[in-house]
Amino acid sequence: MASSSSASPIIHLLLALLSLLSPVSISTTFTITNNCGYTVWPGILSGAGTPPASTTGFSLSQGESRSLSMPSSWSGRLWGRTLCSTNPSTSQFSCATGDCNSGTLACSGGATPPATLAEFTLAGSGGLDFFDVSLVDGYNLPILIVPKSSAAGKCSATGCAVDLNGLCPSELRVSATEEDGKSVACRSACEAFGKPEFCCSGEYGNPNTCKPSSYSEFFKNACPRAYSYAYDDASSTFTCEMGTDYEISFCPTTTSKKAGENIPRAGGIPLINDTMVFMGVVDTSEAIKEHMWPAIPILLIFWLSHLLRLFLSNLV
């Protein structure tokens, strides 16, 4: 009969082998940073049948970051809310853009359009993470997703790093108040007009019949890697190996943070205002440059052609 001392190394070896064969839980960390010159209130919605995130809503002051450990196989969306406050009479919390209609800091549902969305499916098909930035529900803030991975191919940064609020076509603009008329968000054509051809619904509910519109092309030209309409998958979905960590930035770069600024503008991003003035950029990171600079001449061309169409229609 073998002694206990001689059996001990064998037991340890078996336990080591079993630990190697056991399934490993791979965690993913989201580092969410607010580079805007004002407070942003992120909201998070978990998909049906997926484990909930540790929080569904919180605030980020200018320059503040927060890291979240996301559940394995999590899917859902994240967005930024702006111009939020609590009504002193009702104690109801609400936001001018991206509101989730919960009446509290925490969200119990999705973002009210228009809102820029960061969407994720972790450990999805083929063991890959799938992610995108979507403007299908409109736009309210610049967002950039940067995977912390050295993998090549589709594992690369995506997002919309340009401030589109100032350039938004007048028929899509959302203003904080009727008096000032300044745009704080830009609606999708679906929300603005409700037509099936813009919403990819009814007889337009498939990729063969629902095509890009001049409005979706406005978003696509500005942000080529972001979703611009429902069937914009080919150039807008990105993948990384599971276990990759992600940095999610609101207003990815900034040159100034103005205290008390009450109209969301992406300070330092090519700020396109009503007089077509660009305010400059100091961040020279490749991810930022890749998303910003190609958009500038295209946006100018789009806006000029849009004005020409309006002028010609008034002549008819």
Image: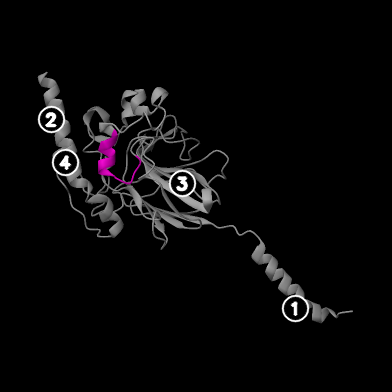
The reply to whether residue 306 is visible in this rendering is: yes
- Label 4, on which residue? 300
Please give the name of the residue rendered at 16% of the width and 41% of the height, measured from the top-left corner: 300
Quadrant, the C terminus: top left
Residues at marks 3 and 4, CA–CA distance in whole angstroms = 32 Å
Residue 147 against residue 260 in the figure, above or below: below
Q: Distance between the residues labelled 1 and 2?
A: 82 Å
Q: Where is residue 277 in the image (x, y as percent from the top left)?
A: 14, 44
Instruction: Quickly name the residue at label 3.
Output: 120
Where residue 56 appears, as percent x and y from the top left, is 49, 43
Identified by mark 2, the residue type is: Leu
Evaluate if marks 1 and 2 touch, with contact meaning CB atoms under 8 Å apart.
no
Tag 1 secondary structure: helix
13 to 315, vertically: above or below = below
The residue labelled by disc 1 is 9
Tell me, yes or no, whether the highlighted magenta stretch contains residue 54. Answer: no
* Amino acid at pointer 4: Leu
Q: Is residue 196 left or right of residue 107?
A: left
SS under mark 3: strand
Marked residue nearer the N-terminal end (3 or 2): 3
**Residue pictured at 28% horizontal, 31% vertical:** 213
Please provide the residue range marked out in magenta: 216-227
For disc 2, the marked residue is 308
Q: Which of marks 4 and 2 is nearer the N terminus?
A: 4
Q: Residues within 10 Å of mark 3 (few under 14, many from 20)?
A: many
Of labels 3 and 4, earlier in sequence is 3
Q: Where is residue 160 in the image (x, y as percent from the top left)?
A: 31, 46
